[in-house]
Image (cartoon, grey):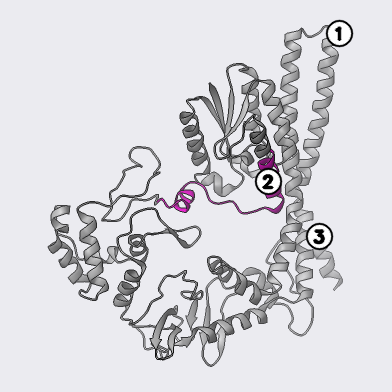
Amino acid sequence: MKAVIYTRVSSDEQVNGTSLDFQEEQCRKYCADKVVEVLTVFREEGASAKSTDRAEFLRAIEYCRKNKGNVHAFVVAKVDRFARNTEDHFRVRKQLLEYGVTLHSVSEPIGQDPVGKLIETILAGTSDFDNAIRRQRCSDGMGARIDGGINPWQPPVGYVCQNAKKQGIKKTIPDEPNKITFPIIQQGLQEMSARLHNKIGLVRRLDELGLAEARGKKTPSQFSDILLEEHRLMFYAGWIWHPWKKEYIRGLHTPMIDDECVYKILDHLSGKKHSIAHNRNNPLFPLRGWVLCGSCARKLTASSSRGNGGIYHFYHCFNFKGKCPMRGKGISKDVLEQAFTKYLTKVTPREGWLAMFKASVVDYWKEKGLSFSQDVLNYERKLKMLEEKRKRIFDMREDGSYSKEEFQERKAEVENDTIATKISLSEARIEQFDIEAAVIYATDFIRDLGRQWVDLPHQLRPRFQKLVFPDGFTYDKKTGVGTKKFGYIYRLNQQSTPKSNALVDLTGFEPVTSSLQMRRSTN
């Protein structure tokens, strides 16, 4: 059995990332498991991901046609890589079946039996629906491995390096403990959490336990700075930092220490006591690392302390280098977060401004974002030309200008080009209407910022906070919440006249459309 592989991305970020390689890796593994020979790979990349053209897709179909009888499978990573709506999916699938080629999905159980066909129909429909609401896809490549609990980078001391990069392969299994250095680092960190050493003392202790002998040289004093870095400590506790999602993912590797041990070490390094919450993404303290001290502008940390009445939660400023009047003084978690939600309500754009913003963006898109509309016209013209060309081919067969073989060859070329063009037309039409849906969703979202922040999952709150306050915000017990810089959309709102519904002039932020310029000239 022989196959072709087709991979495709749908964004510039995926082109520049590892999505194509990740898809090809999945497809090749699938073919190897099924004992299928891979004839060639078609990669839809570069300019293809920035437009709706499917040049490689057309080449793949043509390859199947020209090699009819020698190609048996068309392999994709997922059904939605094949076509973006149900109609296109089954049109192309039917064409491939005429060439004796069946569609195979690496990650989905589709097939020719009734159940497989039902699943394929559902998946194709789901892909269509997915494009309509523009759900965010999970990152591929390294991000996908992190999501799966695999650390894609070289592991820290204490674990065995797989040297996958040198071998030209991708890591697919978790890092394994090094039989010699794992227990040494483990004991050193446990003693550090018990406050038995400072940084220099920890290095000496590790060498006493056998680290220098295992490494073949004395451990330098700077080693402790690397070992005790927060992301590394969290890895030792079984977590992997996801740099794109900005959160920790539970890894599949064997933990060396537990979370409490990490918190105790961080406490010891900062001089704090009785703290039990140091994970930056700890849902208990969503503003940790984002709220700034109103006196010294240093990021506040957070902790929980036990008292006679139970556990109390506070945000703190621990500015050891400066003489901050707020140093060590706790700010009640409830007081600060209630002040934050109240401030969000205060800066929420007014209804009139939101309506004008929506109209301006849609207006700008209609005037400047005409590329997809032009694509639709171009593809419609091309389809008309292809239909006329197909008719001429039939006419030439009837008058004897083409032999049977020539007729079949030309007919197949036109039909395949027609299929690819129809898919491109469908995708251009999808893109045409996305802007209005996106603006409607955006204005609905920012209409009630306080409620949105409270309702969001804790993993998404940092993204929300960055959207509204890119550089964080300050809090002072006397003056409350303040900020030096708002997110782009809120800067526009802040520049509008407070005592009227007049809106900020968008000139300077975006190119001025002719219709917007006309409105300005009549005001």
Quarter of the image where the C terminus is located = bottom right
Residue at mark 2? 126
Q: Which mark is residue 65?
A: none
Q: Is residue 28 left or right of residue 130?
A: left
Q: Secondary structure at mark 3?
A: helix
In the rendered structure, which amino acid carries the disc numbered 3?
Ser
Residue at mark 1? 399
Q: How far apart are the alpha carbons under marks 2 and 1?
A: 47 Å
Task: Give the answer, above or below, for where 78 lies relative to 296.
Answer: above
Number of marks present in the image shown: 3
Q: Secondary structure at mark 2?
A: helix
At which x and y percent is residue 287? Answer: 51, 76
Q: Is residue 375 left or right of residue 50?
A: right
In the rendered structure, which amino acid carries the disc numbered 1?
Asp
Q: How far apart are the alpha carbons under marks 3 and 2?
A: 40 Å
Camera-near label (2 vs 1) is 2
Looking at the rendering, the stretch of residues picked out in magenta corresponds to 121-150
Q: Residue at x 74, y 33 (%)?
A: 421
Q: Mostly what secondary structure, the magenta segment? A: helix
Q: Nearer the viewer, residue 396 or 84?
A: 84
Res. 58 in view: yes
